[in-house]
Image: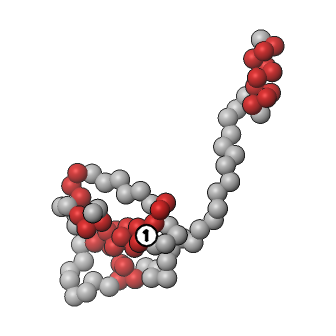
Amino acid sequence: MRYLHERRATLGGYLPRHRARVSQTVALSKTGGQFALDASGKEMSTTMPFVRMLGSLLKDAQLGKRVVPIVADEARTFGMANLFR
């Protein structure tokens, strides 16, 4: 029991705690919410703004490497095929 208590003290206590430091990044690029407003003359579907937002986040220099798009197999149906090359 003494060994277990010593190990816990060495590790910083009995409850785990995340101590990583994360650098702050800019939330959105300069385009802002323009992806949802500009329909380019097309009728806007419900997934079109999401696909545009995800595409702009992937292209962003600061955020692109931090965004991991995990989508269902139906990505082509929802117009997301261009996001994955």
Q: Looking at the picture, how far across and down is residue 1, in whole percent?
A: 77, 11
Q: Quadrant of residue 7?
A: top right
Number of marks in the image? 1
Which residue occupies the extreme bottom position in the image?
Answer: 41
Q: Looking at the picture, how far across and down is residue 76, in whole percent?
A: 20, 61
Q: Looking at the picture, how far across and down is residue 79, in whole percent?
A: 22, 67
For the point 77% across and 33% down, the residue is 12
Residue for badge 1: 57
For the point 79% across and 19% down, the residue is 5
Q: Nearer the viewer, residue 84 or 27?
A: 84
Left or right of residue 66, residue 24 in this image: right
Amino acid at circle 1: Leu
Up/down of 57 relative to 73, above or below: below
Which residue occupies the extreme top position in the image?
Answer: 1
Q: Looking at the picture, how far across and down is residue 78, in whole percent?
A: 22, 63
Q: Quadrant of the C terminus?
A: bottom left
Up/down of 5 relative to 41, above or below: above
Left or right of residue 25, residue 49 in this image: left
Q: Residues within 10 Å of mark 1 (few under 14, many from 20)?
A: many
Up/down of 39 relative to 14, above or below: below
Mark 1, secondary structure of its residue: helix
Q: Nearer the viewer, residue 36 or 7?
A: 7
Q: Nearer the viewer, residue 76 or 15?
A: 76
Q: Quadrant of residue 22?
A: bottom right
Q: Quadrant of residue 54?
A: bottom left
For the point 23% across and 51% down, the residue is 73
The answer to whether any part of residue 58 appears in the image is yes
Instruction: Specify the color scheme.
Output: secondary structure
Left or right of residue 14, residue 27 in this image: left
The answer to whether any part of residue 80 appears in the image is no
Which residue occupies the extreme front position in the image?
Answer: 85
